[in-house]
Every structure is written in C-alpha cells, then in structure tokens.
Amino acid sequence: MTQPISYGGRPITPAPGAPTPELRVAQFRGHARRLTWSAIVLIAVAGAAGYFYGNLPSPLENWMLLAAAAAVVLLLVVLPFLRWWGHLYTITTRRVLERSGVLSVRRRELEHVRGYTVQVRRGILQRMWGAGTLTLSNGVDAPLRLANVPSVELIHEALVDQVEVNQILAHRDAQPPLPPPPPQPAQR
C-alpha cells in the first residue's frame, strides 16, 4: 500500500510533463464479517441434512431433504457470497474504482486529480472489526460510498496521500516550462 520511496523518504516523482504509469495501490472487497450468518447457515444445514438423512418420516423421501437443503444453501449461502465477491474496490495512483455485479457489471470511478473530501463513518461493530465506511465526494458527482472497508484508517491515509500527490503533480505540470539558462561567458 505504499509508493516507491526515494532516499529522502518522499515518493519518486516523474519528470515534469513525462507520462506517469497507473499503478495499483490497493484492491479490496468489503469486510467479510457479513458472511458470518451464511457460514452459520451452511454448518446448520449440513448438520441437519446429515442427521435427518435416512431418518425421515414415511411420506417424505431423502431426495426431498437434499433438494430443500440445496435450496436453502443456494439462497442463504451462495447468493450472499456472490454478492460480496462481485463488489470490488480498486485504488490506483490516478483514480478510485468501484466495480459491482456478477452478471451485469456496474463501474464507477473518481479521479484523484479532481480532488475530493474523504469522510469516515464507523459504527460500534465496525470499530470492533477495524472496518468503516468511506464517503468520497468531489461536490460535482454523486458521492462514492465505500462500505465496510477493512483497515479503514490505512485506506483513508492512502486516499489522502494519492489526492495530495496527484494535485501536486497536476499543478507542477500546469506551470510553463522554465526558460533555458543564458549562455555562460567563455573563460580564458
């Protein structure tokens, strides 16, 4: 989550006007604590199916038990996992990207160079897990909300650093180039 560092401790900056490559700073999903109930349901369904398999009353058959168990696992375990897995946040040296969806993908991005405010909101449970919700707002577009971010303080620091570096580079590149130095007098 850090940038290459020079000897002075500052990030290495490219020469003025030189193109800068877009590097990935961080890539993460929302905190996985939301999958706790899915894991409990999976364990309970597996235990119940194992216990009742072969011990069902007469009108019910084993295939009915397995079909019901599969339906519960699909609805309460697989679908929440796919929803969690399909929501990805990426922070690069140029922008913040949010990608959500499994079958139909929706993308949003916010560029660092435009500048934005970063608001951190943490509930009691989020504080216990070290997570939080970040809201990025540039005042023009709709706010970008990064929900249940793990290690929220580290991500907040990385975002603030990227905005600062990008604005410094944009300001530097907007300056007119320095005139060439005057010729030196010939020494005898």
Image (tube, helix red, strand yellow):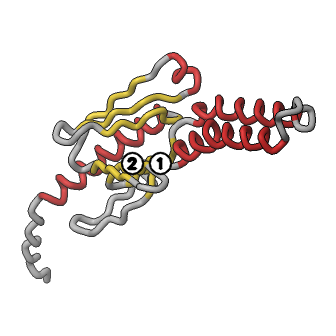
Location of residue 89 in the rendering, given as x and y in whole percent from the top left corner: 44, 47
Give the camera-side residue of 73 and 67: 67
Regarding mark 1 in the picture, which secondary structure is present there?
A: strand
Location of residue 165 in the rendering, given as x and y in whole percent from the top left corner: 30, 49
* Disc 1 to disc 2, C-alpha distance: 6 Å
The residue sitting at the top extreme is: 124
The quarter of the displayed image where residue 63 is located: top right
For the C terminus, the quadrant is: bottom left
The quarter of the displayed image where residue 14 is located: bottom left
Residue type highlighted by circle 2: Glu
Residue at image x 35%, y 49%? 96
Give the camera-side residue of 38 and 60: 60
Residue at image x 18%, y 36%? 139
Give the number of the disc on residue 88: 1
Residue indicated by mark 2: 98
Q: Does the CB distance between marks 1 and 2 fall below 8 Å? A: yes
